[in-house]
Amino acid sequence: DHMVDRLEETLKAQRQFVADASHELRTPLTALGGLIEMLLLGADRGDRATSQRALRSAHREVERLSRLVGDLLTLSRLDARPTVERRPLDLAALVAEVGEQTRFLAGEREVLWQVAGPLPVDGDADRLKQVLLNLTGNAVAFSAKTGQIVLRGERVGSRARVEVADDGAGIDPADLPGIFERFYRGDKSRARRSDGGAGSGLGLAIARAIVETHGGTIAARSVLGQGTTFTIELPLADEPAPATRPDTALATPSEAALRSR
Ligand SMILES: Nc1ncnc2c1ncn2[C@@H]1O[C@H](COP(=O)(O)OP(=O)(O)O)[C@@H](O)[C@H]1O
Ligand SMILES: [Mg+2]
């Protein structure tokens, strides 16, 4: 029976999720345990520089753990209640905000954004911002120090489209179908990423879950060695009836190209 099949599938997926999550949690915990044990046993021989190094390392593992637990919580909340708060928001403003924020994280990389006019959407601004930050975070992680990251926002029919493009390492065609799966990391992604392999493989799964609860789609295209572009499409909020809409809004779309190429 179809319903039973689907229930079985869901349960199987949940079991897999718990198994994968436990496995992911164990890695930083093992590292932490080792570092603490080392300090307890006095393996630093009272050398302050050595103990500081161990503590800094332990601190990084704690940060990784909290990021991981935060991501797991986000996913399990979305699993439990796949609905979002729907408030009017301007996706164009969100793109600019994320562009600004990404610049701080991007080092010497060039971060540009270009949005034509407002993109009114009903949704959860915090979560949609998280989606864009996950994408720009990847763009930073998988591009060269001198790379370029471009965010674009535009209307396509009745949808708002946002693209996040980088000129980085790209994604192997063999990896591309899997990247939105939970815990999926590209085969060589650890070696290629510039932030020391800190990823848990949950960023894109979270992005997809959030976008889909908004009735939208997310997709990736990539050329290995040349770069990657992620495209999000969300339904535009119902626009005001044509009669109440001033013609000038159509005649002079406000160009919010905060910084063009
Ligand atoms: N902009 C990108 N450039 C190259 N590879 C990417 C990019 N974004 C995602 N990927 C690939 O998709 C995988 C999954 O991404 P994500 O879910 O964010 O996990 P994480 O960043 O924790 O590895 C990455 O491990 C990487 O292989
Ligand atoms: Mg990521």
Image (cartoon, helix red, strand yellow):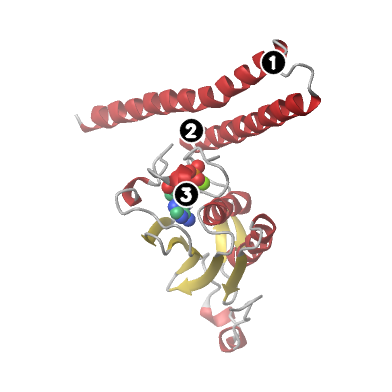
Residue at coordinates 42% horizontally, 73% vertically from top-left?
Answer: 157
Q: CA distance from mark 3 to mark 1?
A: 33 Å
Q: Nearer the viewer, mark 3 or mark 1?
A: 1
Give the answer, above or below, for where 190 lies relative to 90.
above
Q: Position of residue 96 (x, y in %)?
A: 64, 66
Which amino acid type is shown beneath numbered disc 3?
A: Arg
Looking at this view, is 19 or 237 the one in front? Answer: 19
Count all numbered tags in the image, as a single digit. Answer: 3
Is 62 left or right of 160, judged from the image as shown?
A: right
Q: Secondary structure at mark 1?
A: loop
Q: Position of residue 242 (x, y in %)?
A: 52, 80
Q: Where does the C terminus fall, quadrant-wise?
A: bottom right
How crowded pointer 1 is (Cα within 10 Å; few <14, some 14-19, many 20+) is rated as: few
Q: Where does the N terminus fall, quadrant-wise?
A: top left
Cβ of mark 3 under 8 Å from ligand 1: the answer is: yes
Which numbered circle lies on residue 43? 1
Q: CA distance from mark 2 to mark 3?
A: 34 Å
Residue located beneath label 2 in the image: 80
Is 50 left or right of 70, judged from the image as shown?
A: right
Looking at this view, is 114 or 93 the one in front? Answer: 114
Q: Position of residue 133 (x, y in %)?
A: 59, 53
Looking at this view, is 38 or 190 the one in front? Answer: 38
Give the answer, above or below, for where 4 lies relative to 156.
above
Looking at this view, is 57 or 208 the one in front? Answer: 57
Which amino acid type is shown beneath numbered disc 1?
A: Ala
Q: Is residue 131 visible?
A: yes
Which amino acid type is shown beneath numbered disc 2?
A: Ala
Q: Give the mark nearest the N terminus, 3 or 1.
A: 1
Is 89 left or right of 18, judged from the image as shown?
A: right
Q: Give the mark nearest the N terminus, 2 or 1.
A: 1
Residue located beneath label 3 in the image: 192
Cβ of mark 2 under 8 Å from ligand 1: the answer is: no
